[in-house]
Amino acid sequence: MNLWKIAWRSMEQRALASWLTAISVSFGVALIVTVLVVHQVVDRSFRRGAQGYDLIIGAKGSALQLVLDTVFYLGQPVDLIPWSYYREFTEGRFVPAVRVAIPICTGHDYKGFRCVATIPDMFERLTYLDNREFTFWKGRNFYLENYFEAVAGYIAARKLKLDIGQEIRPTGYGEGGKSQHEDEPFTIVGILAPTGTPIDRAIFLNLEGFFRCEAHQLGPSYEEQLLRESEFRVVEHTDTSAHPTPCVQENDSVNGAAEPPSAASDHTAEAVPIVAEKEEKRRLSAILVVSDIENNPQLAMALPRVVNEEPFAQAVAPARVIAELFDGVVGNVQKVLLILAVLVVVVAGIGITVSIYNSMSERRHEIAVMRALGASRGTVMAIIIVESILLSLGGGALGVIVGHTLVGILSPTIAEHTGVIVSALDFQLTELILIPGLVALATAVGYLPALTAYRTDVAKALIAAP
Amino acid sequence: MLLVVEEIRKSFPQPDGGRLEILDIPYFALDAGEQVVLVGKSGSGKTTFLHVISGISRPDSGSVRLDGWDITLLSEADCDRFRAKRIGYVFQTFNLLPGFTALENVMLSMYFADGRADRNRARQLLERVGLGHRLGHKPTMLSVGEQQRVALARALANRPQLILADEPTANVDVGNQQIIIDLLRETCREEGAALLLVTHSPEVARQFSRIERLEELNMVGKREVSEKV
């Protein structure tokens, strides 16, 4: 026999009221747990979304937009940068500062899932999360020489029911609005294993095939003009029209370049080497850069500054932008949600007060009997507070279970909309704060009824009918 | 003497601001192991007298000494502990706690006295009052006679020196009344506890060698009679 057992028996005695009170607490706690878990996992995954590279090189403009487009495949590209600028990272003046540079073109999609044109090195030389290497759930990476090959992220493949050998035609935004490419379709040759990053929700196309689409046979951009004026290597262009699609390339035939291999008949590039002239007309939405900090720390450190001095390019550290985004926007949303959830718990706590306090009139006789049997005022007061704590912790435990179950239920939806994989078993250390928090709340809300118990007039209550 | 009550007065506040005097008892004493029956009219202050003796109510003045300890001088917390250890209380309405089993009701009394409960002694006491087969039953599952027997076992749990029984058979059916009285007297003898039993029943009162009438002990009653005369 102890205070906990006595309090438990009192709760059993009023099982329905106790359950309802505990359930009201559980709702608040479930809300807190859900907010905490979802926020932590989303935060972690978003912050890790850009792991594997430390710089994004893109056109001048909004750094946030560049990161959203490049890392999360959200929104539209800021603008375009010339392919020749990419060459500066692979064989030009930035080479000493760069370990890996991956070109990407965004702005296309397939049935709502973003298509990203890139090179096979994206999955061979980059890593994700904590230096994890990309693996394929099915099939293989696309080959550089097989222009019209593509690989799909895990969720994209699952949602679109894509399988190896399936052909897709990405949709792009041209001058006439959204239009499907009527060129050679891309064939899915691999499906990536889940990464828990936005990559899961994208489809990756061979950049070379992407450039060869008819819709991309457009002229050079303004940036390219600027580049031409600078000391960078440029080529002459005849067409300076608008650049409605993110990645464009001038018509090879117009420029007299060698014809690309006929993808319909042969997907390999054996017959046609990529010539510099043709390459220089290409444009990219971004370059993912892994700086060579180990070998050339000074150059690597200076790289963002040098790039940012260019008239048309910017270098963005995605981790910093994501941190700012979270701390500035998402963090505040989380705070608001947490405050609301805490308010729900506090209201539920007041419910505990009301529930116990209402029961005090019928329990006054019971308390008087305990007092007559020798229980001190402090003991009966402690019994009420312990009862309040049990209700809070019981409701809290229920809330944790409900919250994590909710997270588990919401997991597919979260994954579908954000690419973030959330597990019902994703427990956060911050949840431990709930225990002292609930005990403190219970003690506070249990104080009023406990005081009533403390002040019970034993003689009067004993004489009153039970 | 085990219990000596001297010059106690007890009154209660009235809505008009005055006080209603209930008790004015110059002297009352009880020997260790003695069994006394206290009779009196309804409203004469019998229950209040028991409350004062047990320390549940404080007298306005006077002293209540149990085994040499004046409980009117003890702090409330000490008085609670003192009552728990030395006085057993049997209520007219049994007052078993409804959420607890018969065994737990007995153990509860031990817990309040010592902070721990001797399950074996609680079981033995319940077996002694014939409820060895009802240990896990809650009060609502017991007959009124059985409930009062649990209350008796609970009163004896801490080996008290004094048992105060406030009309213990008033709510018990006729068939069970004598059983309860016999059990109460026998167990008090076995445990060495004195018994002060309040009753309305002349049949019950007749069984005791010492019968006290509250009207004779209480000066309030005497004054009322003389005023009427």
Image (tube, helix red, strand yellow):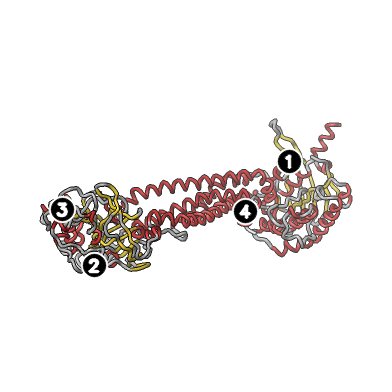
Say what secondary structure mark 1 lies in: strand
Mark 2 is surrounded, within 10 Å at the Cα level, by few (under 14), some (14 to 19) or many (20 or more) other residues, namely: some
Which residue sits at x=30%, y=56%? Answer: A170
- For the N terminus of chain A, which image quadrant? bottom right
Mark 3 and mark 2 lie on one chain; the one further toward the N terminus is 3
The reply, left or right, for residue B158 in relation to residue A260 is right
x and y percentages locating residue A438 in the rendered image: 51, 52
Q: Are marks 4 and 3 in contact (CB under 8 Å)?
A: no
Mark 3 is surrounded, within 10 Å at the Cα level, by few (under 14), some (14 to 19) or many (20 or more) other residues, namely: many
- Determine which residue is flagged by label 2: A268
- Determine which residue is flagged by label 4: A7
- Mark number for residue A224? 3
Residues flagged by tags 2 and 1 on a common chain: no
Residues flagged by tags 2 and 4 on a common chain: yes
Say what secondary structure mark 3 lies in: helix
Which residue sits at x=16%, y=60%? Answer: A278
Q: Amino acid at mark 1?
A: Lys
Residue B34 visible (yes or no):
yes
- Determine which residue is flagged by label 1: B10
Residue A67 visible (yes or no):
no
Say what secondary structure mark 4 lies in: helix
